[in-house]
Amino acid sequence: MIKVAFICVHNSCRSQIAEALCRHFAGDVFESYSAGTETKPQINQDAVRIMKQLYGIDMEATQYSKLLSDVPPVDVVITMGCNVQCPFLPCKHREDWGLDDPTGKNDEKFIKVIRQIERNIVSLRERLNAL
């Protein structure tokens, strides 16, 4: 199984969404993790609410905010688009998805980012499965 880590600074929104969607759409191919250089006391509550509405996924039941040091060695690192120096984790393959942080924005912005993460995961699965 390919180990993939989704990384951003706070590990509270985009990377958490990506971890959940990767388990949902590609759990048979990827072992997924998310992490950051800092943590927040809880996952972004708008992300939690919208992921429940769209997919029936309860991120708070299976995930929590983690530091890079909490993640085992991985094969693939996906950075979310940090707008600052993205955290580093050793890997064989690295991508930056350049996603805007929807924190503090309306549901439409969250859904746009969530749907883009879904498309990116499906594409990643297809590309890495072909290797």
Image: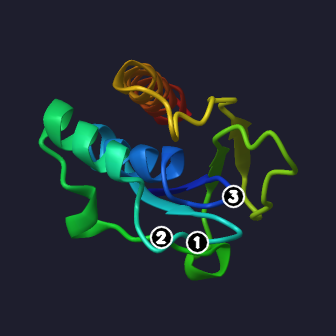
> Disc 3 residue type?
Val
Asked whether disc 3 touches disc 2, contact meaning CB atoms under 8 Å apart, the reply is no
Label 3 sits on residue: 9
Asked whether disc 1 touches disc 2, contact meaning CB atoms under 8 Å apart, the reply is yes
Residue at image location 44% in from the left, 53% down from the top:
16
Label 1 sits on residue: 39
> Disc 2 residue type?
Ser
Residue at image location 56% in from the left, 34% down from the top:
131
> Disc 1 residue type?
Thr
> Who comes first in sequence, dot 3 or dot 1?
3
The answer to whether residue 126 is visible is: yes
The answer to whether residue 23 is visible is: no
Q: Position of residue 48 (x, y in %)?
A: 29, 49
Residue 60 found in image quarter: bottom left
The CA distance from mark 1 to mark 2 is: 5 Å
Q: Which mark is residue 65?
A: 2
Q: Position of residue 32 (x, y in %)?
A: 43, 57
Residue at image location 15% in from the left, 35% down from the top:
53
In the rendered view of the protein, which quadrant contains the N terminus? bottom left
